[in-house]
Image (cartoon, rainbow, N blue to C red):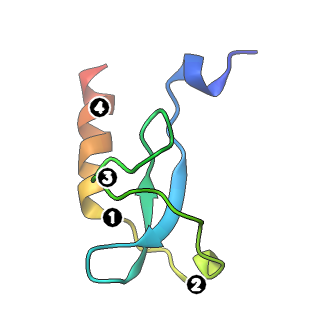
Amino acid sequence: MPTRRELGMHEMWCGADTSGELVWHVLTSDKSSTLCGVEKQDESTRRHMTDRHCFSCMKTFQDVVEAR
């Protein structure tokens, strides 16, 4: 079975956006930061409280997928 890396999958991480609101971000392949440039920290214990997504991360992710 192929690994996530082989499949090119991206993981999600729940953290604050620039305004401090809790949103879901898309992580870079090395999982150290998000596609929008937010440095990854400990994931919020309140992650179940939001279904909002970072627009910048989602747009960048869409561009990556479309480029394949």
Residue tagged 2: 49
Q: CA distance from mark 2 to mark 3?
A: 19 Å
Q: Residue beneath label 4, please?
A: 64
Name the residue at 34% across, 59% down. 38
Do the CB atoms of the residues marked 4 and 1 lie less than 8 Å apart? no
Rate crowding at label 2 as few (under 14), some (14 to 19) or many (20 or more) other CA atoms within 10 Å.
Answer: few
Question: Looking at this view, is 27 or 51 the one in front?
Answer: 27
Q: Say if mark 3 contacts mark 4, CB within 8 Å.
A: no
| Image: 60 above or below 38 | above
Q: Left or right: 28 with respect to 62?
A: right
Disc 4 to disc 1, C-alpha distance: 15 Å
| Residue under pointer 1 | 54
Mark 4 or mark 1, earlier in chain: 1
Of the two numbered discs 4 and 2 on the same chain, state the one appearing first in sequence. Answer: 2
Instruction: For the residues labelled 2 and 1, say whether their Cβ atoms are less than 8 Å apart.
Output: no
Amino acid at circle 4:
Val
| Residue for badge 3 | 58
Q: Residues within 10 Å of mark 4 (few under 14, many from 20)?
A: few
